[in-house]
Image: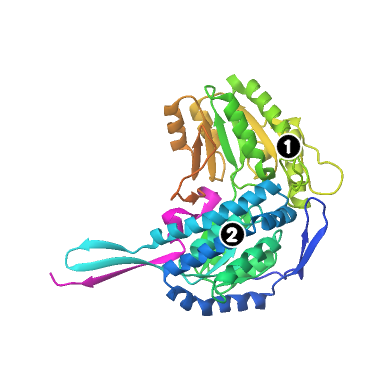
Amino acid sequence: MTTIAQTSTTIRDLDPATGELIAEIPCASTEEVRDAVARARAAQPGWAAVPIEERVTLVDRFGELLAAEADTLGALVTREMGKTLRSAVGEVKGYADGATTEAREVIAALTPITYDVKGQRVETRYEPLGVVAAITPWNFPVGMPLTILVPALVAGNTVVFKPSEHTPLVGARIAELLQQVLPEDVLVLVQGDGPVGAALVDADVDMIGFVGSRDTGQKIMGAAVGSLKRLVLELGGKDPVVVFADADVDAAAASAVDNSLRNTGQVCCSIERIYVADAIADAFEEKVVEAARAWTHGDGRAADVKMGPLVSEEQRAKVARQVADAVTDGATLRLGGQAPDGPGWFYPATVLTGVQQEHRITHVETFGPVVAVTRFSGDEDEGVRLANDTVYGLGANVWTGDADRGARVAARLRAGQIGVNRYLGGGPGTPWVGARQSGYGFLGGPDGHRQFTVPKTISVRVDD
């Protein structure tokens, strides 16, 4: 059993645009966490006995409820974690639709498989694991929980859900909407900070689904060893883009800026390292600076801003330290780099050029609105080596006018998602994979959905 630090008494839920207190939320005690797990465990056999088609119908009802309050829940997302209102409402609407689509994908993934074996009838079924602990982040406080909650629930598991301490009210509302359609204790909410999450990991759960930082993921993995709990960990990244000399410079620069700065850079698969060939570097850097100037920052409720604040004072301080260290190390500050005076945890769009591979900012996740550019010779092998020089492996991107080279480089990059002449992405049925230290297990697609189950193969002798 792990040692659990004493949790805070309450969460102080602060508006990152103003620093004002939104609410003070009581944290669950260790005993309350264990009680929540016991309740979920008692409810699990009955939930697993509900036909999967009926479980999907209930998720459909939840999706309808979620869509119906996209505007109000989106406003709450903006108030709690700062993203622009347009982005927040879009997140709610997108995942309301996505929940129903994903639920049907889970049915397909968990359909029993039969095998043609002489003298036997062989079938593999996918059975629920039991109780799943869902511990989710603040940067996409609607979308990230649902990537765990939907497949876990449709598979027949019950869930104890701990949302981020930065977005407790959004998490509570998601739980309330689900509880309106689910049987009692199929989903149980606990609120709290890191020690509450540690207590949940330590409790009698069968699986832990976590989205968050690499450091916390390592701690969860260590804590789960003693009881061999199943894990799905979607962790951070330090995603590169390699821009070769024959690339479309305008498109590559626009993509690099957009995907370094969206959500104020607080995205696990943000572009955090840009490698551009020397032959086009001058033009590319000018276009990057020009594009980044358009990324105005301010209160996410305002209509004329593209970036809200960072989620916390601590996160802003971390970003500011990385930028200052990079400049001390020899990088050139081309834009931004200075936190504004006044309330709120704002930080402007920042562009660094002349970043070197040995700089700390090249290797440590930034999670902020920084565009970091490094020049390289343009050699294919060098581009691959630099991009792969990281412990992470979430995503990567390649820009080139040579389709064959794009395919070669994509095949050599060590990441779960690769974009060629576009930002990374997937399609229906594809998993979201964190390679290397960006994850353990994966979410989405048939393989991801099956991780919330245990396969059981039954073979019965039959007469010829």
Give the image location of residue 386, x and y in percent: 55, 34
Is 296 or 438 nearer to us in this picture? 296
Q: Which residue is mark 1?
A: 349
Front residue of 36/224: it is 36
> Which segment is the magenta one?
436-464
Q: Position of residue 135 (x, y in %)?
A: 60, 62
Q: Relative to 26, say whether 333 is above or below.
A: above
Question: As drawn, is 103 to the left or to the right of 24?
Answer: left
Dot 1 surroundings within 10 Å: few (below 14), some, or many (20 or more)?
A: many
Question: In the figure, 357 relative to 152: above or below?
Answer: above
Q: Position of residue 434 (x, y in %)?
A: 52, 49
What's the amino acid at mark 1? Ala
Quarter holding the N terminus? bottom right
**Which residue, as the protein is rendered here, is positioned at the far front?**
68
Task: Name the residue: 78% across, 64% down.
Answer: 23
**Does the magenta segment cover residue 445?**
yes
The answer to whether residue 99 is visible is yes
| Left or right relative to 319: residue 131 | left
